[in-house]
Image: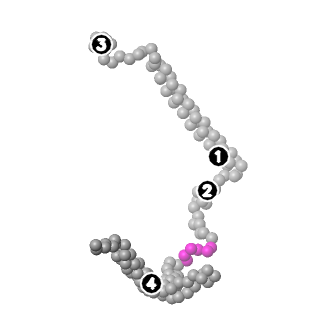
Amino acid sequence: MADNLSSQGRYRHETTDVQDYTIVWIGVVLLLVIVLGGTFVFALMELYENKQQEMGTGGPLKKDLIVERIPPAPYLEASSGAGWTELRKKNEDLLHSYGWVNKKKGSFHIPIEYAMELLAKRHSQDEQGKDYKKKDAAPHTFAN
């Protein structure tokens, strides 16, 4: 087997599959198609631009497009921070007062301090209940 490899030489390839002029021919044709296509597109653009100018229906000029656009009313914020203090006061009043959220459904809000106290009491009662249940759950042993 070593004799077969050494007799073929180090850099040998099949010479009947691909011919050099075929690769060059494909490259030339591809380059020609690209150049002709670009020229055709450029010519069409020039033709249409000239037609528009003859008809007088040219598109808008760039300087006409650059106009300060003001959105329609109502503006989101006419002056920065103008209503911030009123909103802050309204939210603070809601946090520290009683009131209805939805009277038909019977839901209401309570002051935040009272809500935190209720939540703390409920949490401590739940913890005490867990401790009590753990003590009850301990197995009873009977002395004989």
Segment colored magenta:
73-78
Residue farthest toward the front in the current orientation of the protein: 144
Which residue matches tag 3?
1
The residue located at (68%, 48%) in the rendering is 52
Dot 4 or dot 1, earlier in sequence: 1
Which residue matches tag 1?
49
Dot 4 or dot 2, earlier in sequence: 2
Which label sits in the foreground, 4 or 3? 4
Q: How far is disc 1 from disc 2 in space, using C-alphas? A: 13 Å
Which label sits in the foreground, 3 or 2? 3
Which residue matches tag 4?
118
Mark 1–mark 3 CB contact (< 8 Å): no
Mark 4–mark 1 CB contact (< 8 Å): no
Q: Is residue 4 left or right of residue 74?
A: left
Which SS class for mark 2?
loop
Any mark on residue 61, and which?
2
The residue located at (59%, 69%) in the rendering is 70
Q: How far is disc 1 from disc 3 in space, using C-alphas? A: 72 Å
Q: Residues within 10 Å of mark 2 (few under 14, many from 20)?
A: few
Q: Position of residue 2 (x, y in %)?
A: 28, 13
